[in-house]
Amino acid sequence: MEAAPEKPKLTPVKLPGKRLDKRELISIAFELGFIIALPIVALGFAGKWLDARSNTEPLFTLLGILLAIVSTSVWIYRKFKEYFK
């Protein structure tokens, strides 16, 4: 009978030379929520407003949401790339 493979060991998230405690992890979680929500809400409403003014619904709303997804991805990458070095 084969031996069960070893479970991979989980390593804590580290900054260069530093472990993150619970308070810092909660702060990062709230920051991540803010980074995701802010562009989608702001650009979605801006697109909706532009659509109402120019009678092009849903063109600008969809463009706003697409731009929000792209900008959020770039923002998250730049903000958190130091955690994954």
Image (tube, rainbow, N blue to C red):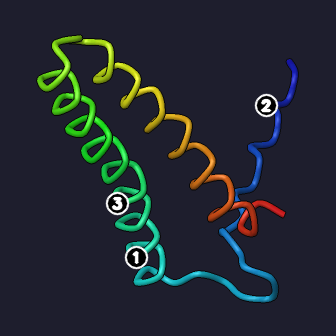
Label 1–label 2 contact, CB within 8 A: no
Q: Mark 1 vs mark 3: which is more N-terminal?
A: 1
Mark 1 vs mark 3: give the one in front: 3
Q: Nearer the viewer, mark 2 or mark 3?
A: 3
Residue at 79%, 31% (x, y): give it: 4
Residue 58 in picture, x, y percent from top left: 24, 12
Residue at x 23%, y 11% (from the top left corner): 56
Farthest residue, direction left: 52
For mark 1, what is the residue?
A: 27
Q: Which mark is residue 4?
A: 2
| Residue type pointed to by label 1 | Ser
Q: Position of residue 32 (x, y in %)?
A: 43, 59
Quick check: marks 2 and 3 in contact, CB under 8 Å?
no
Residue ID at (14%, 26%): 53
Alpha-carbon distance for marks 1 and 2?
38 Å
Figure quadrant of the C terminus: bottom right
Q: Reading the chain from its start, which is encountered first: label 2 or label 3? A: 2
Q: Position of residue 48 (x, y in %)?
A: 18, 28
Q: Is residue 60 shown left or right of residue 9?
A: left
C-alpha gap between disc 2 and disc 3 = 42 Å
Q: Which residue is mark 3?
A: 34
Nearer the observer, 20 or 82: 82
Label 3 amino acid? Phe
Q: Look at the numbered disc 1 and give the secondary structure of its residue.
A: helix
Picture coordinates of residue 43, whole percent (x, y)? 32, 40
